Amino acid sequence: MKAALFYPSLAFCSALLLSACTSTSQNNTVPADLARLSDSALKSELAYDVVKSLTVEVGPRIAGSEGDKRAVAWAEEKFKALGFDKVYKEPVRVRNWSRGIADAKVIAPYQQKLFITALGGSVATPEGGLITQVVMFDSLASLKQADGAHVRDKIVFINQRMQRDRAGKGYGPVVIGRSQGAIEAAKLGAKAVLIRSVGTDNSRFAHTGVMQYSDDVEKIPAGALSNADADNLQAMLNAGKDVTLAVEMRAKEHGWQTSYNVIGEFTGSESPDEIVLIGAHLDSWDEGTGALDDGAGVGIVTGAATVIKNLMGQPKRTIRVVLYASEEFGLTGAQEYTRKHKAELGNIIVAAESDFGAGEIYQIDTLFAPDAVEQAKPLFAALENIGVKQGHNQAGGGPDVSMLPKYGVPVVSLLQDGTYYFDYHHTANDTLDKVDPKALAQNQAAYALLAYFMANSGVDTRPAPASH
Amino acid sequence: MKAALFYPSLAFCSALLLSACTSTSQNNTVPADLARLSDSALKSELAYDVVKSLTVEVGPRIAGSEGDKRAVAWAEEKFKALGFDKVYKEPVRVRNWSRGIADAKVIAPYQQKLFITALGGSVATPEGGLITQVVMFDSLASLKQADGAHVRDKIVFINQRMQRDRAGKGYGPVVIGRSQGAIEAAKLGAKAVLIRSVGTDNSRFAHTGVMQYSDDVEKIPAGALSNADADNLQAMLNAGKDVTLAVEMRAKEHGWQTSYNVIGEFTGSESPDEIVLIGAHLDSWDEGTGALDDGAGVGIVTGAATVIKNLMGQPKRTIRVVLYASEEFGLTGAQEYTRKHKAELGNIIVAAESDFGAGEIYQIDTLFAPDAVEQAKPLFAALENIGVKQGHNQAGGGPDVSMLPKYGVPVVSLLQDGTYYFDYHHTANDTLDKVDPKALAQNQAAYALLAYFMANSGVDTRPAPASH
């Protein structure tokens, strides 16, 4: 059912109610309440305070760990402290893996330590570690074409550098080596795989991230070299000599544990069953404090909802903030949310996740019923005033809401500047100092505008069109 | 004895021998040979190849370690391979200390790992580590004024941030906390001292560097927190709660070992006993590969001397490249060089050390006999053409030559842009990728111009004036 339009139409606003329309963007008039909310959210330190609290008081929180448990408790307390009127958690079974030490060194023809980290989900090396020759490939594709005799009993080094890009377009072509490298290397008889870190930096911190095994291929240890160490190893190999590595990794599976999606709501005053869902993920990798990934998102969506409530009062539709469990290990929190709420997914007016760091938002993409895009013009106008352009209508919505459109749930992607995101992503360097409070507040403003407009305007963008 | 002027005077050059003078700087005509040398050195990859070879084939080389021994052998081989006609080493007794593990964590009111490193020369923590409250001071000066009751049996945290500056002026005011912190904290009964890293970055790599004890004060463990972790600890302490740390460090002294100053020369064809000394230090800290500190310097001075020989032939005075042992642990190589060569220090025409990373040189300071500064104008003109301005006549010359002026030895400081040097200085992140080949070649050109001019022009700047 489409709700009635709560919000004055643009034509109405510009012709009859000028007092309700304060500023104009390039294309449209911005309603006064949106302008006021935007100004307030830009000035509010709420998002920053939330991510600071999470990183300082909890820190690392890999799924199923003690840190994860503390994060769940922290999230419940934080929602309550901020005045969310409904706070609850929903259990999610999560895989619990621990990294252990990960040491590597070149032992011939030179002697040098290499900085590595285990990829998420990797098995350990055999007791005492591995000592064997390393062979280099420039991509997963090259590895797939390799002769088994060249690879057998060796360590495979996939040496593909990620390119820097505002939208993070360099990630996809390289991350395939992280996820599939162990499978392809094992098929050829390799003892282990090391990839060049999927990151745009030159730090010696290696980038972790989840990797995959295949049931019909031997599981071999998989790690990432820091970019600086990948350069060093590459220089040795390019000099044409055989290079021998010693690698020891003590990663370990601890079985499945219970974690939680933690949910805070401001219940709708007129249509409480209609949900505006904004989310982020609560878990993080274990080496940094999860400030950018995804403490920033947690701060942004929690701050946005709170700013709305504090400034504009109770929303007409329910604003639901979902902090998902275990995004990093296979989106299990989001999968569980979708399963559990399947019967009521039709009530979600729109869903959006913030999970790309703390860079400024420059574009809004939507996945709305096509004829509804026009109705969202006041939102686009307000966003344009804070530097966010309207993009296309084929949005994905972010990882944890990516499975919703197939149920007809409209989603929005607020695209962030990710130019420097992959310098820190999945490393020990993902810490609070990398969060720019001003850019974070701009994110908060954009999510506040989105959530408030979708909760209070009466615009209904359902159902999402079939995904592209 | 002052040597005769080998070099045409500026007046001579501009009036009579125009063909020998190709380009002009703002103030002066640049002799053709200097211009040719400069062009060639700017294009030569020699300096980069040398630092690459050192970092890839040797890597970390803390004084007295196996890496240090490999570095000495590498340097002798490198000098020979590059055609130095005299290659030798002189023994230096060096202190050999190893870092061991250095772990710290907050255990109350939160639970978080902190990234630390031991300061160079620190003792270990007692077996099993230390667990105690931490107290914060904003500087060494504040610590000195503290009440002992506030500090006794606690860990002192000196939380002073280094400011970024092209000339590295932020280092001095902060490094005093690194060198003296353990003494002042121990005087007040502290169990250990942790300083905020002396560095301008926000990385989680902590910055090491040598620290000092006093014989009449108890030796307590001394470490550095990464800047990101110092921020985190500061946030916890500023929230007003007592914070308890667990710290374990296993640093160890291994007694004194023999290392070497390694020396390569191009013997002077006319005045072999007159020495133009350009140097750098061969040792490095143990966590990075010593690319900026001081592989870059090794590359620059080795490359500069080699470019001169390859392009201009044998110099008239001897060009001596000295790669000093154990600069990081008290300049012991330089001290030994000075002792051993005391009788012949008067033969050094000029000395200069490159030890400030790989940033471009922007200024030349001198410490010349005052009436000799004018004679160096062709050199200043040539340097100006590669972006190097003439500065003052009160130079220090660099750490390993800093003790020479009191013996009347003129020195030169070629000031490098150190804006980013202290992002990496004394960390694991000091690796080859931080070296910009173009900036390194400009350094090589500046040192080549200096060494060639001082070796071939006949200009004699001795004796250095009494130091300022």
Image (cartoon, coloured by chain):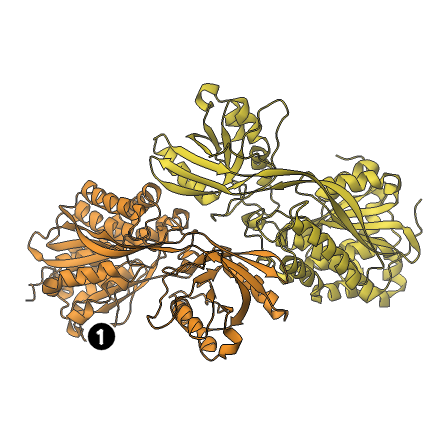
Chain colours: A yellow, B orange
What subunit carries mark 1? B
Residue, x 64% and y 46% (percent of image)?
A: A62
The residue under label 1 is B467
Of residue B207 and residue A356, the one placed in the foreground of this image is B207
Of the 4 image quadrants, the one containing the C terminus of chain B is: bottom left
Residue, x 34% and y 70% (percent of image)?
A: B214
- Badge 1 marks a residue whose secondary structure is loop
Of residue A48 and residue B42, the one placed in the foreground of this image is A48
Of residue B280 and residue A454, the one placed in the foreground of this image is B280
| Image location (x, y in percent) of residue B105 | 55, 57
Q: Quadrant of residue A95?
A: top right
Residue A187 to residue A25: above or below: above
| B374 to the left or right of A452 | left
Of residue B446 and residue B187, the one placed in the foreground of this image is B187
Q: Quadrant of residue A370?
A: top right
| A205 to the left or right of B444 | right
Residue B178 to residue A107: above or below: below
| A361 to the left or right of B22 | right
Of the 4 image quadrants, the one containing the N terminus of chain B is: bottom left
Residue A268 appearing in the image: yes
| B8 to the left or right of B181 | left
Q: Quadrant of residue B320?
A: bottom left
Q: Residues within 10 Å of mark 1 (few under 14, many from 20)?
A: few
| Image location (x, y in percent) of residue B197 | 46, 62
